[in-house]
């Protein structure tokens, strides 16, 4: 809850700082007008999707944990619970796929911002951070399979691995191991989505700070131009002497 409030405050400050239109002077004499408000609004939509993904990952993890304990205390799950386990793992596969897509979108936004603001430089390379995030997600899936003593080799991606887990849950052979692995993957996904949320908030803060500085610089520059080009009558203060006629 504290993280959600922090995110909301960050977004509110960011929106306030970029509500104005930023004018960027390129190398040519022509002026280009960029409205960053739409960019921020779209980024906000992605951030809300990350939070939604995180919430669903938590629900899935809790369900898988319950199924895992039930399988440990019985010889195998009842048929209805088999189906529930398979459906839950299918949901987990969708959550992972959506999380990867959100990370790719975050990287796209980083490139888009750099295109809008060629002079922007950040202390952190967000594109590389998103690449590392995706690699960590993949390693978490394969690592969970190894911990559960399931074969991790031979799977081209996370989706194939989870498909194999779904099939294992539907049989008495390796059922407990499959549920344990799926539970570990769901736990890792919760952590990963929290990390992705923090990464996107950090990106928003860095970009918002830059846009606010650009806005301030633009306003100062425009004010200086107005002052420099303001017309001043050189005869200001001049009073002509009265002319007397007929003397």
Image (tube, helix red, strand yellow):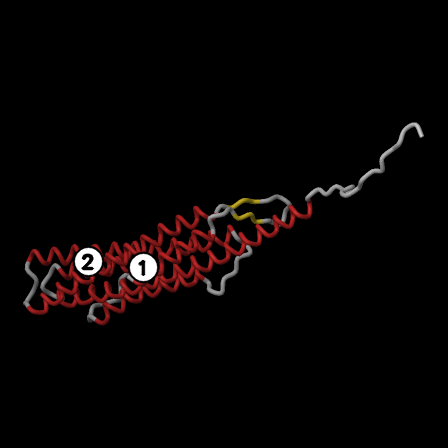
Mark 1 element type: helix
Which residue is disc 2 drawn over?
89
Q: Quadrant of the N terminus?
A: bottom left
User: Residue 168 lies in what quarter of the image?
Assistant: bottom left
Q: Quadrant of the C terminus?
A: top right
Disc 1 vs disc 2: which is toward the camera? Answer: 1
From this view, report whether residue 133 is shown above or below residue 43.
below
User: Residue 88 lies in what quarter of the image?
Assistant: bottom left
Give the camera-side residue of 26 and 171: 26
What residue is drawn where x is 24% and y is 65%? Answer: 187
Give the camera-side residue of 28 and 139: 28
What residue is drawn where x is 83% and y is 38%? Answer: 240
Q: Residue furthest top?
A: 246
Alpha-carbon neighbours of circle 2 within 10 Å: few (<14), some, or many (≥20)?
Answer: many
Alpha-carbon neighbours of circle 1 within 10 Å: few (<14), some, or many (≥20)?
Answer: few
> Position of 221 compared to 126: left or right?
right
Give the camera-side residue of 19 and 74: 19
Q: CA distance from mark 1 to mark 2?
A: 27 Å
Q: Position of residue 22 (x, y in %)?
A: 53, 48
Q: Position of residue 21 (x, y in %)?
A: 51, 46
Q: Which mark is residue 157?
A: none
Q: Are marks 1 and 2 in contact (CB under 8 Å)?
A: no
Which residue is disc 1 drawn over?
4
Q: Residue furthest front?
A: 247
What residue is drawn where x is 57% and y is 50%? Answer: 219
What residue is drawn where x is 31% and y is 59%? Answer: 4
Which comes sooner in the sequence, label 1 or label 2?
1
Q: Position of residue 120 (x, y in %)?
A: 53, 57
Mark 2 element type: helix
User: Residue 92 lies in what quarter of the image?
Assistant: bottom left
Q: Position of residue 243 (x, y in %)?
A: 87, 33
């Amino acid at each position: 809850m504290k993280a959600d409030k922090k995110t909301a405050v960050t977004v509110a400050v960011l929106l306030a700082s970029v509500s104005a239109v930023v004018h960027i002077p390129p190398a040519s004499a022509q002026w280009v007008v960029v409205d960053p408000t739409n960019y921020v609004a779209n980024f906000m939509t992605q951030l809300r999707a990350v939070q939604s993904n995180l919430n669903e990952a938590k629900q899935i993890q809790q369900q898988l944990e319950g199924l895992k304990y039930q399988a440990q205390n019985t010889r195998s799950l009842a048929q209805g619970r088999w189906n529930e386990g398979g459906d839950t793992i299918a949901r987990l596969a969708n959550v992972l796929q959506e999380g990867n897509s959100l990370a790719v979108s975050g990287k796209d936004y980083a490139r888009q911002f750099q295109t809008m603001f060629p002079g922007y430089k950040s202390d952190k390379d967000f594109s590389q951070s998103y690449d590392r995030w995706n690699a960590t997600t993949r390693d978490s899936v394969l690592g969970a399979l190894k911990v559960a003593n399931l074969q991790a080799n031979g799977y081209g991606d996370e989706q194939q691995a989870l498909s194999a887990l779904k099939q294992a849950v539907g049989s008495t052979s390796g059922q407990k191991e499959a549920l344990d692995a799926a539970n570990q993957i769901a736990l890792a996904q919760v952590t990963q989505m929290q990390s992705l949320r923090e990464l996107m908030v950090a990106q928003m803060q860095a970009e918002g700070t830059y846009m606010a500085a650009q806005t301030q610089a633009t306003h100062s520059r425009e004010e200086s131009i107005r002052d420099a080009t303001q017309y001043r009558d050189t005869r200001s203060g001049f009073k002509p002497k009265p002319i007397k006629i007929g003397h």
